[in-house]
Image (cartoon, rainbow, N blue to C red):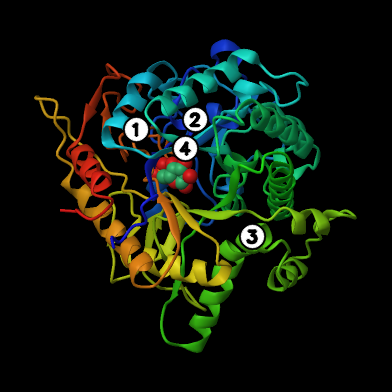
Amino acid sequence: MGIFPKDFLWGGATAANQCEGAFDADGKGPSVADVMTCGGMSKFKVTVPGIPPEYEHYFTKMRYVTYRKGEETGACIAMKKNTYPDGGEPSFLEGEYYPGKQAIDFFHHYKEDIKLFAEMGFKCYRMSIAWTRIFPTGEETEPNETGLAFYDNVFDECHKYGIEPVVTLSHYEMPLQLCRKWNGWADRRTLACFERYTQTVFERYKDKVKYWLTFNELNSIIHGGYMNAGVFSKKDEDLEFAAYHQMLAAAVVVKYAHDHYPQFQIGCMISYDPPYPYSAKPEDNLEAVRSFDINNHYYGDTMIRGYIPEYKKKDLERKGVSLPILAGDEDILAAGCVDFVAISYYQTSVAAAKSEGMEKTAGNLGQHIMNPYLEKSEWGWMIDPVGLRYALNVLYDRYHKPIFIVENGLGAKDTLESDGTVHDDYRIDYLRRHIEAMGKAIHEDGVKVMGYTPWGCIDLISCSTGQISKRYGFIYVDVNDAGEGSLKRYCKDSFYWYKKVIATNGEDLS
Ligand code: BGP
């Protein structure tokens, strides 16, 4: 018997706002992602309160959101709530470069790109629908037919090659209008707009899409909710409200899907980054459990088990936050439990009861305690394949639901050689070690994993930095951070390697 199940879903993952481009084509409205800049290229320089000077340079590489505040214009860091201006309104500004406007122009290249996915042998393709192609402001009552038709074409193209689409309903790209008007998901009124959008796409694509995910990395809201929830305020309370409303919305649509489309499989998606205790000290271990629960499990527990866990109620009590829970909400959560658990896995973290004075590294969201046993990527992300096996074990033991790894991968600089080749052995090495770890979790630990879709199977815009030079793909796209280039596609060495991995169902990783 092989390591991976016969029907294992090998594939790759992208998100509309990071690959499609064509940001205003055919009636598409602006999304929160569209007004985000490319790291290092904005005319603004944003400083982050409380960050020591040696880390300041790091934040010039992060993505900014440009805004207007009356006559004033400015920028803040998309993933850092303490840089958001009071009373600002995210807006396009003259003279700023917004990489999502073009991205890799998947909108016009999807046939070519899906053909390449098919050549690698993809069984599935994780992608997202841009809500603003269907409902440009989020508030319309009738959908935009040309937007719907675009995804019909994409799904048909996938099925032409036997590729099963795995569709995220909301991947960091809600309508800008809902952010400006209601502070996004902080306001419960957003839920009705989302319901209308999901019911529309469920009905339209019911015969073309079987696997659905509700919100991408719902738990990352808490770090700064602009990208994933359209929250443009510094208040922790707004972020807690937004996370609650999204979990509620997830339950509403899961229940709706179960009632109307029994053929669907619908999952939640969380960014899963287990914290290791810094030492064997009981206090560090307690802190690791606490931060695992608050940062990861709260969201899974609510969407998979169907209720808000006690530890979170206590946490909210301590913060003085009272969630806007209405009569009937508890029943909604209980009735909308998912069919499977989807995660992104990039790295682990370290938890200590007291972290002052410890060596830190700069990851996506700022400073993390350095783990001396791990290597780092060029962008400071810890590399930890064993951590994936650890994560899968914890997750499966906790929920006993099939797990879908819908993101994992290495963001790295690649060189396109003059003969059109790209030698990315570092990426092959990274993926090989993670697939090995996943194989052990399945084969030796009995974890049920249903599929694996490495992130950015074709190069695309980085979500944290807006750079395209932070490449994840098996397919190289000739375009630089300033949007210059032919947009021509080239197959990297990893393309041929992954093709072999899929063809042998994960047996040959050499
Ligand atoms: C996840 C997001 C993706 C993706 C990935 C890699 O958090 O779901 O959208 O971009 O991270 O991160 P980055 O692009 O910042 O390197």
Element on which disc 1 rests: loop
Q: Quadrant of residue 358?
A: bottom left
Look at the numbered discs 1 and 2 and tell me whether their residues touch, using CB distance below 8 Å. Answer: no
Q: Quadrant of residue 232?
A: top right
Q: Earlier in the sequence, mark 1 or mark 2?
A: 2
| Of labels 4 and 2, the one closer to you | 2
Distance between the alpha carbons at the discs numbered 3 and 1: 34 Å
| Of labels 3 and 1, the one closer to you | 3
Distance between the alpha carbons at the discs numbered 4 and 2: 17 Å
Q: Which residue is mark 3?
A: 304
Q: Which residue is mark 1?
A: 468
Q: Nearer the viewer, residue 358 or 389?
A: 389
The kind of residue tagged 1 is Ile
Q: Is mark 2 within 8 Å of ligand 1?
A: no
Image: 441 above or below 143: below
Q: Quadrant of the N terminus?
A: bottom left
Element on which disc 3 rests: helix
Q: Is residue 324 visible?
A: no
Q: Earlier in the sequence, mark 4 or mark 2?
A: 2
At 51% from the left edge and 31% from the top edge, which residue is drawn?
Answer: 36
Farthest right residue? 327
Distance between the alpha carbons at the discs numbered 4 and 3: 32 Å
Q: Which residue is mark 4?
A: 63
Distance between the alpha carbons at the discs numbered 1 and 2: 15 Å
Q: Earlier in the sequence, mark 4 or mark 1?
A: 4
The kind of residue tagged 3 is Ile
Q: Which residue is mark 2?
A: 16
Label 2 neighbour load within 10 Å: few <14, some 14-19, many 20+: many
The kind of residue tagged 4 is Arg
